[in-house]
Image: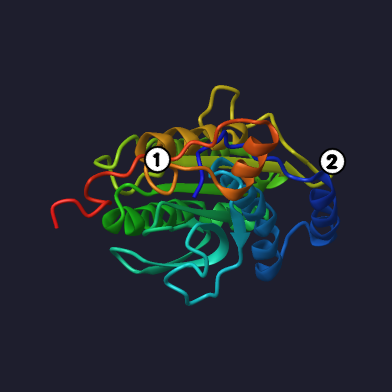
Amino acid sequence: MALLEEMPTIKVDPADLRAWAKKWLVNQAFNKKEGMDFGEIFDKQVGSALAKMLGGIDVIAPKPKDLLPSEKDAVEVGPVRVIGGIRPQNYDVGYRPDGVRFVFDSKTLNDTKSVAKNFQNMVNDLGTEATTVHMRFPYAVVGFMVVIPSPCFTGGIRSRFTRMLDRLVGRASPVDAAHKAEAVSLVLWDPKKAKIDLDWPESKSQLRIERFSEQVQRHYYERYDGMPPHDRPSKSQKTAMEAAGEEIPEPEESEEENGAGD
């Protein structure tokens, strides 16, 4: 159980990017497995930031076919199996204490040819992934990150793909369009400098990585703040409150919880 806190901004360890940049520069591409493994550095950061927002709860690794988490109140860093309204789908990060409340997927396009060939199909896939969750779990917060080497993302594709992702983000309420996501980031990285490229998307864009956490937090708070399990402090929160000499809040039990009227 945990009271909600601020969700930290998603930041990538420069050492992780340097290691992957060396691999990418060999052929100016990743193979399929490398691309999936590269995405895991973003999955771990999102999982860690989400766990902090949820009160410093545990981050665990799920078993691929588990339909429920092994720990009820824990963030899972994928593959998280969800039986959605369209199809079963694995996500990279999930939180499902009583059903799906949050899922996240990272997607990578890792060379110029792949970007040109697959960007439109990727948008379709993201819309389907959002829909399959929202059809069964309309209150779920869905997030995506699309990660691309900046040298591979130029010309007309840059503006077209960005506009398509813009139309995919912005699901404001549980009755909004199911194919939209609550949070989407387009992340460009420069393999030569081993850094996130902050020149694109534009500074006011909702797709910038530094806005991802605030989008997740806003929608999650609107739907779940004060609801169990966020109606009492977690173990780590209790420890911090006790050390600071603060009173530990406990929720009042309703008549139904007390068995009144039986």
Question: Where in the figure is residue 158, as x and y percent of width and height?
Answer: 57, 38
What secondary structure is marked by label 1? loop
Task: Answer with the quarter of the image where residue 31 lies.
Answer: bottom right
- Relative to 36, say whether 120 is above or below: above
Taking depth in this image into account, of 213 and 186 the one nearest to the observer is 213
**Amino acid type at mark 2:** Lys
Question: Where in the figure is residue 106, as x and y percent of width and height?
Answer: 57, 54
Q: Are marks 1 and 2 in contact (CB under 8 Å)?
A: no
The residue wearing badge 2 is 193
- Relative to 61, say whether 160 is above or below: above
Comes first in the chain, label 1 or label 2: 2
The residue wearing badge 1 is 251
**Amino acid type at mark 1:** Pro
What secondary structure is marked by label 2? loop
Question: Where in the figure is residue 194, as x and y percent of width and height?
Answer: 82, 44
Q: Residue furthest bottom?
A: 65
Taking depth in this image into account, of 182 and 232 the one nearest to the observer is 232
Q: Residue at x 65, y 57 (%)?
A: 39
Left or right: residue 99 versus residue 71 is left
Of badges 1 and 2, nearer the viewer stands: 1
